[in-house]
Image (spheres, rainbow, N blue to C red):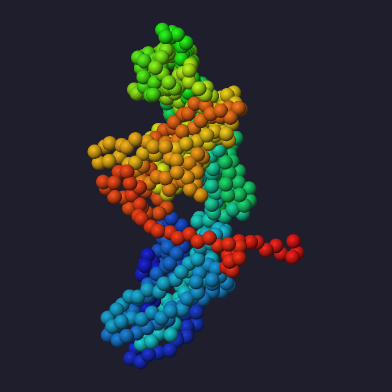
Amino acid sequence: MTTAHHPQCPPNPLQMQPTSTPSGPAAPSPSQASREPRSIRQHPLPPPEPLRQGPGNGGMIHCMIHRRTIEILVLRHGSDLSSLTSVWCATRPSDPPSASPGIDYIPSSKKVEFKPGKTEETCSLTILDDIQNPSIEGSESFVVFLSSPQGAVLQEPHEANVVITDTFQDIPSMQFEKSTYAVKEKDSVLHIPVIRTGDLSFKSSVRCFTRTMSAMVMDDFEERRNTDESRITFLKGEKVKNCTVHIIDDSVFEPEEEFQVHLGVPLGDHWSGAMVGTRDIVTITITNDEDAPTIEFEQVSYQVREPPGPDSVEVLNIKVIRQGDLDRTSKIRCSTRDGSAQSGVDYNPKSRVLKFTPGMDHILFKVEILSNEDREWHESFSLVLGPDDPVEAVLGDITMATVTILDQEAAGSLILPAPPIVVSLVDYDHVQEVTKEGSKKTPSPGYPLVCVTPCDPHYPKYSVMKERCEEAGINQTQIHFSWEVAAPTDPSGARSPFETVTDTTPYTSVTRMVLDSIYFSRRFHVRCVAQARDKAGHLGTPLRSNIITIGTDGSICHTPVTTGTARGFQAQSFIATLKYLDVKHKEHPNRSVVPDEW
C-alpha cells in the first residue's frame, strides 16, 4: 500500500498492496473517481494552524508548505516487502485549470522506487514564485497523482490537490531602505527612502511619523505626527517614495543627538490591504560639527621684511581665528618652531596659551623679528597650534603657518606665498588627500614626481593662494623648477647630502615641474625648488618643498634592492642598442600617406 502526502500532513495513507505479479496502471473505479482529492496548501510564514482530517473535512487534508520545493511522502506497506517495487509520481492541471504548468509549478513525471524492506520514499515538486513581477493571484491548484505501479497495486487515495496560496506573500509591503542615517544639521532636510515590494498594481500608503529620543521636537527637528497628514502614498507601479524630515539648524554646538522615524497604519486598495515590513523603524543621528568651535590660523604663510637697523625689531601680527559656536571659553597653545630661521638670532621664540572668551572670534599672536647682519638669503620658521588638543574646541585645517623673513640685501624679492609640495604624478588630482596629516601614502618607484606650487590649481587651499599669486604678479607657467635628490639612508641612519639633478637626456628635463623616474629609485629622498619669475624675467627667491621618500610598493617595474649600496641606484645593469631609421626604411619610412579623397 502507498500513500502520497507532505511530511507535515497527518498520515492518512493511500494503500498499495504488493502483488505476486506486476500490475499495469490501475483505472480508478467510479467510487474512486467521485472521491474528493487530498489538498496540500501553501501559506506564507508564519502559517495558520493546519486543518487536520476529521469529521466535516470531506476527506480533504490541508498542509502548510514553507519551501519552494515540496517533498510529498509516498508510503508502501504489505505482508511481503522483500521485493523491489516502483510507482510513477506525476503532475497534471486541475479541472477546471487553475495553476499553470511552467508558470506556477514545474510539471513533473518521475519514477519512485522502493528497495527491499523500504516503506517510505518521497516525490519532489517545485513551486515557481513570481518574484520578478509579484501579483496577488489568490489560491491556485494542480494535481499530483500516482500511476503505473510495478510489483504493487494502488489504493486510495492515490492523488492529491496541491493548493498554492500567495495572497499573503504578495501583499504590498512597505519598509525603510536602511535602519540608520546620519545627517548634518546644516543640511536642514533629510529624505528617507521607503521601499515598497509585492504586488505594485494597486495603490498603497503608510504613515511615516517621528519619535523623540535625545533630539527634541522644534529644537532639533520638525515633528511628523502619527496622523494621516504624515501619510506617504504609492501610486500604481511606484516602488520608492521619500519620507522627508526637516532638521532645525542653529549656531549652538551640541553633541550628536538622535530621534526615530516609524512606519505604521498601512492601507491598500486591494481587498488584502497592505503591510509594513520588518524594517519599520529608522534611527536618525544629527551631527553639527560645523558648529563646533574651530581654531586655526587665518593664513598658511606670512612674509615680513627684516628690520633695517642692527638693533631694530619688527613685530608680526599672526591672526588665530575661532569659528563656530562662540558661546564658550576655548584654549589652545601657539608656539614658534625653527626652520632655516633660528630662534634668538632671526626672531624671538614664543609659546603661550591663547584664551578665547565667549564672543571672541580671533586673537593676535605677536612675533618679534630680529635684524641679522649675517643673513644672506630669505629664511623661514613655522608657527604651530598644539601639540595638546584644544580645550572646548577642535582644530581647523590650518594648524601650521610658515613665516618667511625677506632679507634686505637679498636679490630677487619675488617669492611664492607658500612652499611647494612634491607628490607622485599619479596623485596630481588628489594632492590634498595624500598630503593631509596621517596619510601614509608614499610615491611609488617608476612613476614621475610633480612639484605643485601654491599658484597651481591642484595646490591645497588654492582658493586662498590664488589671490596672493595674482597680487604678486606670479605666473604659474613662468615658474622655474629644479630638483634635489639624496640617496637612501644607510643602515647607521646617516643620510647623504642632497645634490641638484643636472643631467638631462633627449627624453627628460630637470628644470620642469615633473621629474622623470629615471632620477630616483626606492627609498631615495627627493625635493623640488621653485622660483617665481617677475615680468622682467628675473628669478625670485627659491623655495624648497617638503622632503619625500620614495616608497617600495606599487612600482611599474621591479627593481631589486641591495643592502649596503646607499648611494647606488640599486638597479639591474642592462645594455640597449639604438638604431636610427631614416625616411627610406621599408618598414618604418617615417612618413605619412594622405588619402586621395582628402
Q: Is residue 28 above or below residue 298?
A: below
Q: Is residue 118 above or below residue 130?
A: below
> Residue drawn 30% across and 86% down?
83
Residue furthest bottom in the image: 21
> Residue drawn 30% across and 82% down?
115
> Residue drawn 61% across and 49% down?
238
Q: Is residue 435 above or below residue 137?
A: above
Left or right of residue 337, residue 162 in this image = right
Left or right of residue 536, residue 444 in this image = left
Q: Look at the image and tell me in which quarter the C terminus lies.
A: bottom right
> Residue drawn 54% across and 71% down?
102
x and y, in percent, of residue 181 in the image: 47, 38
Q: Is residue 219 above or below residue 345?
A: below
Q: Foreground: 344 or 359?
A: 344
Q: Look at the image and tell me in which quarter the N terminus lies.
A: bottom left
Q: Foreground: 365 or 582?
A: 582
Label tally: 0
Q: Foreground: 73 or 595?
A: 595
x and y, in percent, of residue 561 in the image: 31, 50
x and y, in percent, of residue 510 in the image: 48, 41
x and y, in percent, of residue 501 in the image: 43, 40
Q: Is residue 276 visible?
A: no
Q: Is residue 508 visible?
A: yes
Q: Quadrant of residue 313?
A: top left
Residue furthest left in the image: 492
